[in-house]
Image (cartoon, rainbow, N blue to C red):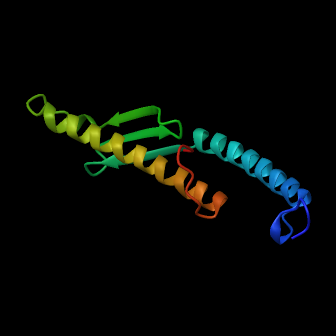
Amino acid sequence: MARGGFPGGFGGGNINNLMKQAQAMQKQMEEMQKEVEAAEFEASVGGGAISVRVNGKKEVLGINIKPEVVDPDDVEMLEDLVLSAVNEALRKADEETANKMGKLTGGLKMPGLF
């Protein structure tokens, strides 16, 4: 080992390259985050009776309920269908975010990011 150096040639040049790579990855992650936040995800349940649209920010953009599914005597079923559709749309948004992050990081898990 050279005096004052790191074993394996891990010198200043490699650290600079590592920093550049980290900055490039950070920029890619920021761009990917904007792309995912702008994307819309839709899920429908009950044979299309209820559909929900969300964005990557996990904001509900719209809920469509077909009139024939509205039964004043069975509000609980309607609530369950809406809940299921919202959860499925959010799951799709999470899944797409995870897929894009996995491609960017090569499968490396980064807790706290997305």
Image coords of residue 95 (percent x, y)? 47, 54
For the point 25% across and 34% down, the residue is 67
- Compared to residue 53, the image places residue 48 above or below, namely below
In-image side of 71 versus 47 (left or right)? left
Question: Relative to the observer, which residue lies in front, 80 or 64?
Answer: 80
In-image side of 72 versus 8 (left or right)? left
Quarter of the C terminus within the rendering: top right
Snapshot quadrant of residue 15: bottom right
Q: Looking at the image, how many numbered discs can be counted on the residues?
A: 0
Image coords of residue 66 (percent x, y)? 29, 37
Q: Give the residue at the far top of this rendering.
A: 72
For the point 81% across and 56% down, the residue is 18
Image coords of residue 87 (percent x, y)? 34, 43
Question: Relative to the observer, which residue lies in front, 13 or 43?
Answer: 13
Image coords of residue 33 (percent x, y)? 63, 43
For the point 44% across and 46% down, the residue is 42
- Compared to residue 81, the image places residue 10 above or below, namely below
Quarter of the N terminus within the rendering: bottom right
In-image side of 68 versus 13 (left or right)? left
For the point 90% across and 56% down, the residue is 12
Question: Relative to the observer, which residue lies in front, 12 or 27?
Answer: 12
Q: Give the residue at the far left of this rendering.
A: 73
Snapshot quadrant of residue 13: bottom right
Question: Relative to the observer, which residue lies in front, 91 or 76?
Answer: 91
